[in-house]
Amino acid sequence: MATRGIESQVLAQLGPLTITEPVVITWGIIIGVAILVKIVTRRLTLEPGNLQTVVEGIVSAQEAAIRAVAPGYERRMLPFIGGLWIFLVIANLMGLIPGLHSPTRDLSTTSALAILVFLSVHWFGIRSAGLKNYVRHYLSPSPIMLPFHIISEITRTVALAVRLFGNMMSLEMAALLVLMVAGFLVPIPILMLHIIEALVQSYIFGMLALIYVAGGIQSHHPKNSESEKEST
């Protein structure tokens, strides 16, 4: 676990573009996950080994969670929601590596994730109901409700970003303070607290994203589902 300050370290400056540690770690996670997925899916068998069994278990658990919130849309939503969960778990646990910080304790990272969720809500909603029906929802039951719908979308996006940022930053600050006071006499409880909190925050953010996306789909097109399309 890193012990320097909570500010993001600047690694390079390319004109107006500043490359910070969270940016590098984020891209490292994305590339690492992409390589791992490529390796795992290259040799799938009917009799899975240990690694394939673990991966299938993770995918099945994600599908079950999506199915519980948005029945019939698990195949459509799994790539985004499942990928978001995997990224968050790894990103939140990066702070356990000496010399590194979790990129999710940086507001720019959590803001980018929240914006992705915001855009995904509208993408899935328009894809499900069509642009005309989707926009009509924001004008019902009266066009006067439009500003309130817009404010609601913005505030929940901001809250999504700030919640994860605040929790992860406070977690690392608390761990840093304890280590400064008690030294390394109590490393195991601190590590366990970090792991549990990191997993909890990953689950909460992913579930909120799932609920928001499912709400965007079901509120505009409640009777249409992927399962019904497949049956026809």
Image (cartoon, rainbow, N blue to C red):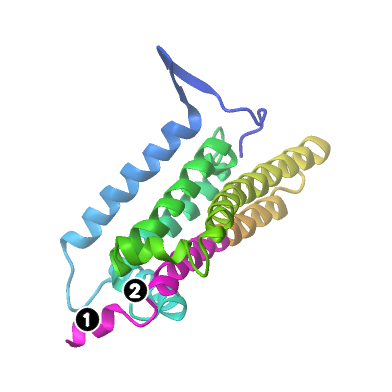
Q: Residue furthest right?
A: 181
The three-letter code of the residue at mark 1 reads Lys
Can you say whether 229 is above or below 176 in the image?
below
Element on which disc 2 rests? helix
The three-letter code of the residue at mark 2 reads Glu
Residue 229 numbered tag? 1
Magenta residues?
203-232
Q: Which residue is mark 2?
A: 74
Give me the residue at 65% from left, 57% from top.
192
Mark 1 / mark 2, whichever is N-terminal: 2
Which of the two marks, 1 or 2, is nearer to us in this view? 1
Report x, y in % for residue 224. 31, 80
Is residue 71 at all visible to an observer of this figure? Answer: yes
Give me the residue at 62% from left, 46% from top.
162
Please tell me whether the stretch drawn in magenta is mainly helix, strand or loop: helix
Q: Is residue 85 magenta?
A: no
The picture quadrant where one finds residue 84 is: bottom left
Report x, y in % for residue 203. 54, 63
- Which quadrant, please, contains the C terminus? bottom left
Give me the residue at 53% from left, 36% from top.
108
> Quick check: marks 1 and 2 in contact, CB under 8 Å?
no
